[in-house]
Image (spheres, rainbow, N blue to C red):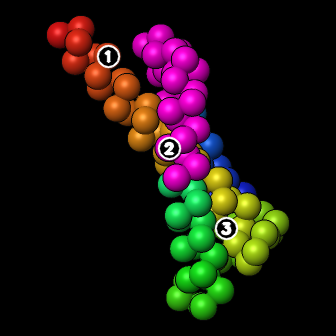
Amino acid sequence: MHAEYLLVLGAILFFPLLLSIILRLRMYTHYRSLLKAMVVVCVVFWTWDVLVTARGHWSFNPSYVMGWDLLGMPVEEWLFFPVLVFVSVFTYEAVRKVWKGL
């Protein structure tokens, strides 16, 4: 299936978004910190990803990606790092909130 990578990213993002509403984390109030973290992580790892992909150290199976590329990498790979940062920050905030409630 050509959208499998995108569907996996969607599934990874779905539950934290849902739980952020249920737990009332109000992550939007911390958007500046979240954006700063995303910028730092994305710039470093996108650069690294583009370089190692261009050198042929790894590749992406066309059977699992949509086929839209930018600088030799599928769009799904470009979305991976912002999703990873969001889910990491969500996990931290959720554990912190639940821990306070105990």
Query: Which range is magenta?
Result: 15-40
Per the model, the C-alpha gap separating discs 2 and 3 is 28 Å
Specify the quadrant that holds the N terminus.
Answer: bottom right
Instruction: Give the main secondary structure, helix, strand or loop, of the magenta stretch.
Output: helix
In the rendered image, the residue lying farthest to the left is 102
Camera-side mark, 2 or 3: 2
Mark 2 Cα-neighbour bin, 10 Å: few <14, some 14–19, many ≥20: some
Residue matched to label 3: 64
Q: Say which amino acid is labelled 2.
A: Ala
Residue 77 appears left or right of 36: right
Residue 37's mark?
2
Query: Would you say residue 39 sits in the magenta stretch?
Result: yes
Q: Which badge, 1 or 2, is on the more N-terminal residue? A: 2
What's the residue at 59%, 70% (across, down)?
Answer: 47
Residue matched to label 1: 97
**How far from the left and from the top, in percent, is residue 45?**
53, 65
